[in-house]
Image (cartoon, helix red, strand yellow):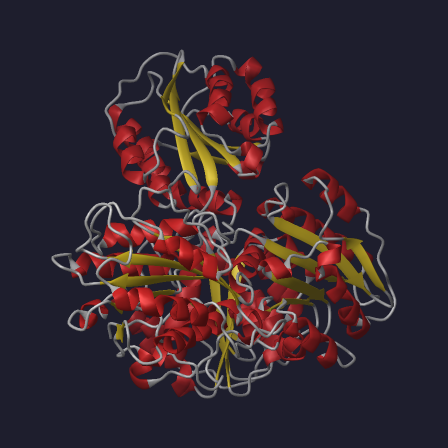
Amino acid sequence: MKTFMKNLLAKVQIGPDKTRIGVIQFSDHNREEFQLDKYYTQKEISDAIDRMSPINKNTLTGSALTFVDPYFTEPKGGRSMVKKFLILITDGEAQDDVIDPAKALRDKGVVIFSVGVYGANRTQLEEISGDGSLVFQVESFDDLKAIESKLIFRVCALHDCKSIRQLDVVFVLDHSGSILPQDQESMINVTIHLVKKSDVGPDRVQFGALRYSDHPEVLFYLNTYSNRSAIIEHLRRPRGTGGNTFTARALKHANNLFTEEHGSRLKQNVKQMLIIITDGVSHDRNQLSDVASKLRAKGIIIYAVGVGKAKQEELETMAGNKNYTIHVSNFNKLKDIYLPLQDSMCTNAQEVCNIQEADVIFFCDGSDMVSDSDFVTMTTFLSDLIDNFDIQSQRMKIGIAQFGSRYQEIIELQNSLTKTQWKSRIQTITKSNGLPRMDLALKQVSVMFEQSAGGRRKAGVPQTLVVITSGGPRYDVAEAVKTLREDGICILALGIGDVYKEQLLSITGNSEKIITFKDFDKLKNVDVKKRMVREICQSCGKTNCFLDIVVSFDISTHLLGQPLFHGHPRLESYLPGILEDITSLRGVSCGAGAEVQVSVAFKVNSDQNFPAKFQIYQETIFDSLLQVTVNGPTHLNAQFVQSMWDTFKDTSASRGQVLLIFSDGLGGESKIMLEDKSDRLREAGLDALLVVSLNSTSHDEFSSFEFGKGFDYRTHLTIGMRELGNRLSQYLGNIAERTCCCTFCKCSRTPGPQGIRGPQTLKVPFSCDMLLPNRL
């Protein structure tokens, strides 16, 4: 245990202004080894740990949790504006109550990680942490080493929002005469830190800024810059200070930055945030309340930072909430507010949902197992959750049903409600009550995904059922769940209260699609809402049995005006059969429907405006290709591949995506650039890039950037090779199963030779979106 603690220390930065460490030992009484402000170096803490000796008595964990509570306060070395973590390590069952003292700690913002060894009680550990994902269990103390990196990763992930994802932020910066050059630098450093922590872009985080004294001056609008470096360069430009502090006038002018004309995405439901930093009393403070209220009424969150003589009363007038204010004694102390400001941005930033379309049904427990107050908490959670989805355009269709003694549909997928109407409808739901007959309700809820009810399964749109329950199923749900999975419906389970992952496995069939919390109050946590959005948009982002293929021809010997197949009679002869094979895949197990629907688009170098549109292949399409004349030679390079990828821009990301190229060789093109482009497209969602050589000497040129052949990655494809169409069909079938059908099978595949993933027995879980790398 002592080695485990010292190894954790080696993974963090220790110091009075960095991470502080304290250690408490407990048994039937509690012993302070050292508090948070005792030691500030790795060696001092390590030596103190070495000097520890065990108490060797009983296990009064609840008493220890109460004892440790004051150790997070300032008298014991705690700091008010930093994240607080407790790592509890135990090998036994607590002999006293742990629920109340643990909740008291969590209510004060302390995140509790519970590490249980062998005899530790899993139920108690979850009661202590309040979240199953914060619990780690090992067989013996020797096995603690195995969880060091996982534990530190979770601590760091909760401590530091790595990248703020989607937000519109405007800085309002006081440049009055009381601000010295070094003060100005400290203020600008705050803004630069926040920019560096954000994922900047027109569809991610946007920044605008203005400075003010007697009059406001816009530095840049939300849509002026689309990358971090440009914003930072502008913020760092030297500027003079002087004049008075007309804060209300500045806030009134800031309203212009939150307009659609200047880049605001307020109408797209992107959160709006204004961060003001000032060091003095406003000269127009009598107007401050009215101006700030109008901004907040518009939906803009105001975070007010005061320095020195700034008045707390004014900060609260602007923010409208004391929790959105910070006051520091001088500009040097601004470095202490980096984390709380960053946390506020992280809290308010929305989770990005990358899937273009989805059908989602929230399936809620309205039985007697859920109290009236908890039911209200659950419906409020769903009401807040809707802000993260685009339901106005109908790309995301959201429905609700509940179960108790009876099944009840609340909102169908084919509803035409606005967000306001949707929220109003959900807040008026009447609880079903009675026994939680989830088994009967699961048989009925499948109807809500049908086309007649607004479902879009046949159009390739992913469908997700989110089960929110206060307990595991009391009756057999296997038959109902089997039907849902066969329909390609992804099932997520959110268990709240006295419920554990093992009880919910019969619903999801996959532990990774289960989330558990000890109480409904967790649903009020912003991070929980974001986590649910991620699960819906990432875990269940692909549906079954739709594959789009872009076919292109790279022929370097072509001259202007020649027919597409000039000089390549074998291509002309074999291509119709190849296209028949790859567009009529058989034997792919995708749940609902035994066949994959394949659409093909042809990207050709022609001035005849041959349309690069996806369609079901027919012989008439090949007849049209025979009539095509080319603009001249083509060259297989990064630009060529990118132009093919651009064909997918208007298609759903939930469909499998493949590039198929017929090429006569690379010539002098750069393999390195092609490899880089291949990697980037794979990251962007391309499922396969396959090349068929048109001559026998160039076939091995393509192996470094091809992917999507599975175990057959060493095979070079050449026109005229035996059963080329069948071989391509096999690759595409594997891709369809791996990418299209993983909503219910999770693409769990055994690693092949040297870790290659192939279509073998479903044993070891791997991520659906990871494809075979050809370069080992």
Residue 552 spot, x, y in % from top left: 32, 57
Taking the image as shown, residue 540 lies to the left or right of residue 399, namely left
**Would you place residue 318 above or below residue 160 in this image?**
above
Residue 639 spot, x, y in % from top left: 25, 50
Residue 632 spot, x, y in % from top left: 21, 47
Image point (48%, 15%), residue name? 249
Image quadrant for the N terminus? bottom left
Q: Is residue 445 visible?
A: yes
Residue ranking furthest to the left:
668
Q: Is residue 517 visible?
A: no
Residue 532 or 10: which is nearer the viewer?
Answer: 532
**Would you place residue 88 above or below residue 167 in this image?**
below
Taking the image as shown, residue 648 lies to the left or right of residue 669, namely right
Residue 729 occupies quadrant: bottom left
State the count of labels: 0
Image point (70%, 61%), residue name? 449
Residue 20 occupies quadrant: bottom left
Image point (15%, 57%), residue name? 670
Residue 761 spot, x, y in % from top left: 47, 86
**Would you place residue 196 above or below residue 404 in this image?**
above
Image quadrant for the C terminus? bottom left
Residue 455 or 644: which is nearer the viewer?
Answer: 644
Residue 150 or 578: which is nearer the viewer?
Answer: 578
